[in-house]
Structure formats: structure tokens, C-alpha cells
Amino acid sequence: MKMRILLIIIFCLISWNVYSQRLTCEHIDQFELTDIYNELTKVGVYSVEDSKCFGESLSRRDSTNGIKQVLTYSGPFTNGCLKCLYHKFGFKTYEFAPDDLIFETIDSFIQAYNTIMKSMLTSNQRRDIDDFNYSSNEIFTTFLTTKNQYDLELVNDSTLNFKMHSDTLEYLFKSDVDLITISIADSINDANPYKLSYPDLKTNGFKVNTGDGKKLKLYVCYDFSLLPDKYEICWCDVLEKKYRMIIPLKLK
């Protein structure tokens, strides 16, 4: 008899724990966004209407608490345009879900959440966001940091002079491109890379010791920390500041 009572108690505790983990509109603010995403991707557990209720409830409570943010999708072909545009209007963005996975519950949650958040925007701000179009030739993207022109000049038997510049970045940032700083190392684990300004690397270059003549690699990092916001090209302070690349040097 005691064993039966014990099993009933254990079953009730397990059932209560499982039930307590389910999302509800009344207690949605007790869950982190990552937890909400994980729950909503469980097939057959929540309906589209459930998800809409969750999004509306959380958005109302967040906005009441002074939180101004919109949920976005992430993916390899996304850029910082909307992130910067919302930043301009005083909103932050949160990458809630990948754009290559389809869940109606996720879409319903995001749409419901963002609809209430966007109601705090002015009509002009909403129009700017809704009408936003971009040209890949006129905006900043991470990919552009890899589009550089290189120049190698032999100084002596063991030294090369390496120069690098980017016509695209110069076109986008104009005179502000001079604020870009660059770090160069010959090892990915180098704790003290050589640092110089973009104009210095373009004009004067960086001396590279060729050593025994084997294949050389430079680990280069663009640092955009000093660049001011430039919303028209989709660059702003909330984007990643440092962009790294590996450049192989071919010795002739």
C-alpha cells in the first residue's frame, strides 16, 4: 500500500513538472526566448493560435516594461539593414529563428510579437521599414570585407612588403574609411598582432618575413569600432565590429 502511494506521488510530481514546462499565455514571460523557440519547434504540441497568443502576451508585457525590440530571422544571406534601421528608431533586434527552417508556430509567434512592437513606431518610421529596399552594390555586408586588392613587393631575399586596399569599402565609407584599423599576424594564436591604420596599409604596407620560403599566411582583422553610424549603407554601431580573414601569400 505504501509503495502504491509512493508511486502515485512520484507520478503526480512528474506530471506536474512536465505540465509546468508547457508554454501558457499567462506565464509566457517566465520563459527565455531560446526556451520559447525550442518549445514552438516541437511538432504537434502547440497550435498556430497558441503561438499567436504567446507572441501577443509577451510583446505586451515587454513593451509595458520599456523593452523595444523586434524578432528577426537569421541566415547566411541576411544583412544588417533592418537591424540598423530599427536601431535608428530606438529598437533592438533579436535573431529568434533561422530562415531556412519552416515552422508555422514560429512564424505566428514572430508576427504577433512584432505587430504589437511595431505599433510603437510612428507612421513615417513604419513606412520607412515596410518600403525598405536595398541594392547589394550600395550597402555594407560582411562579404565586402573579403573583397580586397593586394600588392606584394620583394624587398630582399627574406622580406616582402604587403599592401592591401578595398575600393568597395572606400566607396561606401568615403573619408571615414581612414578610421578603419587593421591587425596583422602570421599565426592565428598571436596575442600581439601588428596594428596599423587602413591608409597606412594601403600606402606604406606591412613588412613580411618570408623565412624559409614556405607557404605564408597572414591573419588579417578589420576593426570598424571607430566608424560612425551610416544608416544609408546599412552600417551602424550594433553590428559586428571586427571582421577576420586569412590571406595566403604566393611567392613567385
Image (cartoon, rainbow, N blue to C red):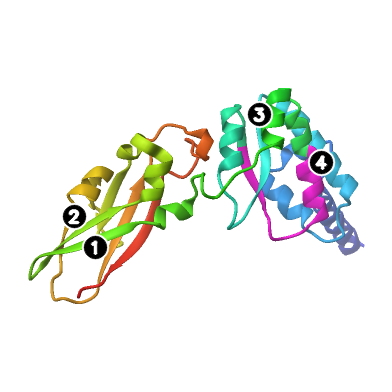
Q: Are marks 1 and 4 in contact (CB under 8 Å)?
A: no
CA neighbours of label 1 inside 10 A, class few (<14), some (14 to 19), many (20+): some
What distance separates the C-alpha of mark 3 from that of mark 2?
46 Å
Q: What element carries label 3?
A: loop
Disc 4 from disc 3: Cα separation? 16 Å
Q: Which of marks 1 and 4 is nearer the N terminus?
A: 4
**In this rendering, the label closer to the viewer, 2 or 4:** 2
Which element carries disc 2, helix, strand or loop? strand
The amino acid type found where label 2 is placed reads: Phe
Q: Residue 145 carries which label?
A: none
Please provide percent x and percent y for residue 54. 81, 41
Q: In which quarter of the image is residue 186?
A: bottom left
Q: Nearer the viewer, residue 235 or 106?
A: 235
Distance Cα–Cα, label 2 vs label 4? 55 Å
Q: How crowded is mark 2: few (under 14 residues within 10 Å), some or many (20 or more)?
A: some
Judge whether residue 135 can be spotted in this image. Answer: yes
Q: Position of residue 127 (x, y in %)?
A: 71, 30
Q: Mark 1 points at which residue?
A: 186
**Residue at the left extreme, as displayed:** 156
Which amino acid lies under the numbered mark 1 shown in the image of this protein?
Asp
Range of magenta residues: 93-112
Badge 2 or badge 1: first in the primary sequence: 1
Q: Is residue 224 above or below residue 119?
A: below
